[in-house]
Image (tube, rainbow, N blue to C red):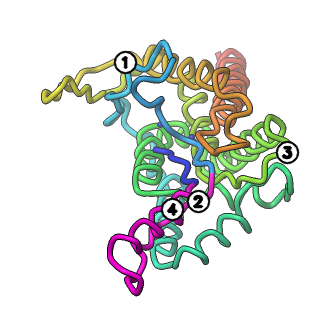
Amino acid sequence: MTENVVVRERQQGRRQDVRGQQQLGKHAAPRRARHYPSIANFQFPEPGTRNPFAILHPVFPVSDVIPSRSTPVVTLGLIAANALLFIYELTLPDAALRDLFHTYGVIPGDFVWISTVTSAFLHAGWLHFLGNMLCLWIFGDNVEGRLGHSGFLAFYVGCGAISALAHAEIDRLSFMPMVGASGAIAGVMGAYFILYPQSRVLTAVFLFFYLELIEVPALIFLGIWFLMQFFSGLGSIGAEAASGGVAFGAHVAGFVAGAMIGAVWRGRERHRQQLWQ
């Protein structure tokens, strides 16, 4: 698991086009670059950033060790909906894609409530989309098994909305649209952190040209992921509004909301068990 790259470069693209015309001739056709003027809200810190956990960049989850209690129909449905919309995005020209993000993404400076839901079904590129869907598949089925189908759907939408509101509050004056399901998925990871503390996550670790698969306790894997988002968010406060970037604040808010809801749900389960006994 909230990959994301913010694509910002209308001016850079124009400068490249001008240089290309100068080199190829006056009548040469300029090259067109695909632009995504948005904040994608899930990404591990880039290597070389001032982040104490940057060394963990070449690490990503593969699966967990707990089988699903039932068929995760809501998780599968969310993945299918995101996939269909992403395929639709790929068919759009640049201008239409920018309009789509500005219409349905979360824009703090021009906030619309429905965008807290619609933004969670848009993605800013292949890595953004695949990373989010992988994390949703790994952690979503088990959380859905505990909360139930309808409860999980409400939980997912709620965590996405909370994360979007947190981002809008942090960057109130920003007109850069934020898109991505990472806030909602961060909520799923937060709930998993509380509901399945005994679980382990099969993790791929890249060491130069060597790939190793290891099992990491879920508490450690998700705890480190949360700290990565927290410290990265502290180091990038205000930066996203001006130049785009990863909405770490949305990740932190989604994770905390999911963990709190997971704690309440786990307490209710214990209470019911005590009453039954």
Give the image quarter of residue 269: top right
Between the residue at mark 3 and the residue at mark 1, the CA separation in whole angstroms equals 33 Å
Residue 76 at x, y = what percent?
Answer: 47, 57
**Disc 3 marks which residue?**
173
Q: Which residues are magenta?
A: 9-38
Residue 261 at x, y = what percent?
Answer: 71, 29
Is 121 on the left-hand or right-hand side of 239? Answer: left
**Disc 1 marks which residue?**
55
Give the image quarter of residue 204: top left
Amino acid carrying label 1: it is: Ile
**Disc 4 marks which residue?**
15
Residue 106 at x, y = what percent?
Answer: 74, 54
Amino acid carrying label 2: it is: Gln
The extreme left residue here reads 210
Give neighbour class at mark 1: few <14, some 14-19, many 20+ (Cα, 10 Å).
Answer: few
Between the residue at mark 4 and the residue at mark 3, the CA separation in whole angstroms equals 28 Å
Between the residue at mark 4 and the residue at mark 2, the CA separation in whole angstroms equals 6 Å
| Nearer the observer, 37 or 71 | 37
Q: Which mark is in front, 3 or 1?
A: 3
State if disc 1 and disc 4 touch (CB < 8 Å): no
Against 164, is 230 above or below?
above
Between the residue at mark 1 and the residue at mark 2, the CA separation in whole angstroms equals 32 Å
Give neighbour class at mark 4: few <14, some 14-19, many 20+ (Cα, 10 Å).
Answer: few
**Disc 2 marks which residue?**
11
